[in-house]
Image (cartoon, coloured by chain):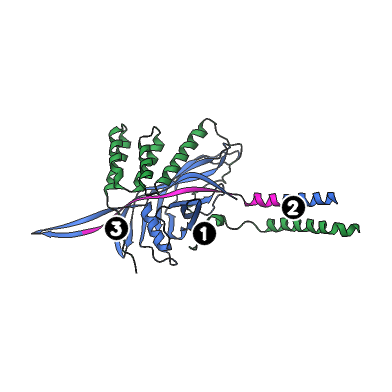
Amino acid sequence: MKTHLKLCSFIFLTSLSVISSQGTQTNLVQNLTFKLTAWSQGTTTTNGSIVTVKANSQSIVTKDILTWLGVATTNNFTTSQLLVINQLGVPDSKSYMVVRTKVGNVTNNVDVSAFFGIITYAPTVNSYSYSLVNNAISPGNYYGYWGFYLLENPSCPLLPVTFSLNGFGVDSVVNVIGTKKVILGQADQFSVTNGVGTGQVNGNPFVITGNVSITGKTVETHP
Amino acid sequence: MKTRICSPYLLFTLMALLSIGWFWSHPKPAALLPIIASPVAAAIDRPQTPLLPVKAMFPDTNAIPGELIPDQQSIDDRIAGLNELATKDDVDSLNLILVSLTDVNPQIRAAALDATVQFDRPEAIPALQDALALEPAPQEKVNLQNAIDYLTLPSFAQNIIARP
């Protein structure tokens, strides 16, 4: 009887360990950052016979976009982070744009992926190397013509600003190294610098310039 | 008699085996479900890693020299910390960012400059001007001046009118 009991316990514990090892997941967490300038038509003033027309240039940083996403999703994102999360070491895994808010020990993530779009307009020009022995790819750079969009979302129609930004971008692939000094996977450090595009605010158009980047190599393990 | 004693254990064993089978046949649901609590619609596809000719592999034997790791890891941690501080809105967080503008490590200095811009407060301009005066490298001088110019711009957020 004791043997049976031991056998049953062993099988049960083994099944638990199998379940727990299946559930562990490693995510790469990166920052999505905007540093943009919006150009719009300013005021027209008349002083005697002189009419002066001004162009407005105004800054848009990540905090502004978080505020707008908060309006659209009826959340308060004033001290939140805009993150890109994807499964590390899983090629072609889906990326999620997430707004993370920490209040004390509580972390809340809201998926805002539906508000963003990224397009590669043309095949990239690539610079990398790989081993013929094991097919392992070394870090490299991928240069291309990219488009980055802040989009209206039909299910959350309150987004006050939309825009598209196009330009030359670099996708720089680097190794992500774990605590045991082993390469866990690779991370894309993406940036479009000096991009140009157009946008709309309250129905008024504006021209937009600036940078968008996805950077960071933070790794999180979830049970 | 013996059969009667054994049957609960056999039943237990059977259930354990069934549970293993069930978990094998039902893989864990979508990748990020545990960390995403959102009503918002499905995510977009990530930018496709372009034209990779072969499948990426990350063998365990692909370790790198030990001396470089802790240093770069601590730099990455500090950069992550600066990025997090940039999301705050209090003076202490801004000051913590500004002291890193003159860090000895160029990666930290660059991250501090980015965090200062993302903090988006004109109060940071005097500290940027001080860093500019101390900076010998021409390119970093340009970056500091660009950051000062950017922070003098009014915010686009003032154009936003709340919709009814």
Residue type highlighted by circle 3: Gln
Residue situated in front as seen by the camera: A96 or B123: B123
Question: Chain for mark 2?
Answer: A
Chain A, colour shown = blue
Residue that numbered label 1 is attached to = B37
Residues shaded magenta: A15-42
Chain label for disc 3: B
- Identify the secondary structure beneath mark 2: helix
Q: Are marks 2 and 1 on the same chain?
A: no
Q: CA distance from mark 1 to mark 3?
A: 31 Å
Please name the amino acid that badge 1 sits on: Ala
Q: Residue at x 56, y 57 (%)?
A: B33
- Residue A127 can be seen in this image: no
> Percent position (x, y) of residue B48?
49, 52
Give the alpha-carbon distance from disc 2 to disc 3, as whole Å: 61 Å
Are tags 1 and 3 found on a single chain?
Answer: yes
Corner quadrant of residue A56:
bottom left
Q: Is residue B16 left or right of residue A173?
A: right
Residue type marked 2: Phe
Residue at (61% x, 49% y) in the render: A24
Figure chain in green: B
- The rendered magenta stretch, by its main secondary structure, is classed as strand
